[in-house]
Amino acid sequence: MAILRNPYVALALGAALIAALAALGGWVSGPPMAETLTARAQAAIARADGAPVTARFVSVRGWPSRHPTLAGGGGLDEATRDRVAKAVAAIPGVGGIRWADGTALAQSTTAPPERLDCEEDVDALLRSRTIRFEEGSARIDAGSGALIDEVAGALRPCLGSIIAIAGHTDASGPEPGNLALSRERAEAVQAELVRRGISGDGLRARGHGSRSPVEGLDPTDPANRRIEFSVIATRAVRPTPVDTPGPR
């Protein structure tokens, strides 16, 4: 046919054929590759004391992928998350890693930076007032809206840093429930700050349950129910091969 004699058409058809063959090869070899990497990743996670973290080698469209999503690390400290991510990244054939909770990079285990003015300002705001929630719920009390406005304003000088939002409860209930509730409340505060223009990329919500009561207070004292803020990195996170987005 005359159309096939056109060199541009022939090149286009050849490229399409190569792409089709590549897709077919990926479809055939992809699942075994993902299964092998998953097994190796889970072994690496176990060696890094990262249970119950899981590694899922599937893209957002459901295709097998060399770029895993790590999930289940919300209750781990930053040093453990960092160790787990690096252990998985060291496996031959593994590409960029992301955390399902959106963390752009597992934090370094180096000493925390000196306190910044924004931390002092937020502490001063929360020293006499508390972000309140409905009883046994992560729903923020309507009367706390003005205080969150002030907190957002105090945090603006630290934009570009990584800010931890820590939720705490008292010890009056079962600890699994305390952990879940404290995290949900921290996430609720995070969402309200994002609504007020604070970038979610720089916020890390964590729940600590009742394990860190206020010094001098009985663990069951309701005054232990609180939200705390701290700067855990003083510069914007730059993605690295350990955790290149798509990765809290």
Image: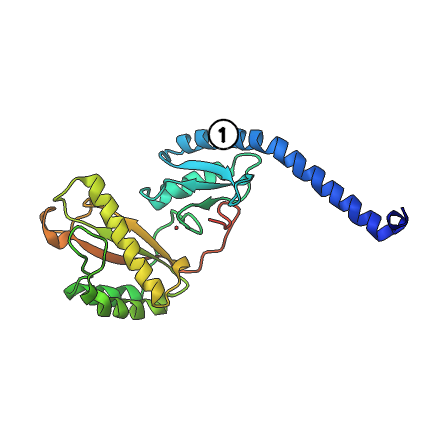
Residue appearing at x 30%, y 50% in the figure: 206
Front one among 178 and 235: 178
Quarter holding residue 121: bottom left
- Secondary structure, mark 1, is helix
Q: What residue type is labelled 1?
A: Arg
Percent position of residue 38, x then y: 49, 32
Percent position of residue 91, x then y: 53, 34
Residue appearing at x 36%, y 46% in the figure: 78
Q: Considering only vertical position in the picture, is 105 above or below 51?
A: below
Q: Can residue 44 be seen in this view?
A: yes
Going by the picture, which residue comes out furthest to the front?
1
Percent position of residue 104, x then y: 44, 52
Q: Using residue 196 as the reference point, say whether residue 147 is left or right of it.
A: left
Residue appearing at x 52%, y 41% in the figure: 62
Residue topped by disc 1: 40
Q: Considering only vertical position in the picture, is 121 above or below 240?
A: below
Q: Using residue 133 as the reference point, say whether residue 38 is left or right of it.
A: right
Q: Is residue 124 visible?
A: no
Percent position of residue 138, x then y: 23, 53
Front one among 139 and 163: 139
**Colour treatment of the image:** rainbow
Badge 1 crowding class, 10 Å Cα cut-off, few under 14, some 14 to 19, many 20 or more, is some
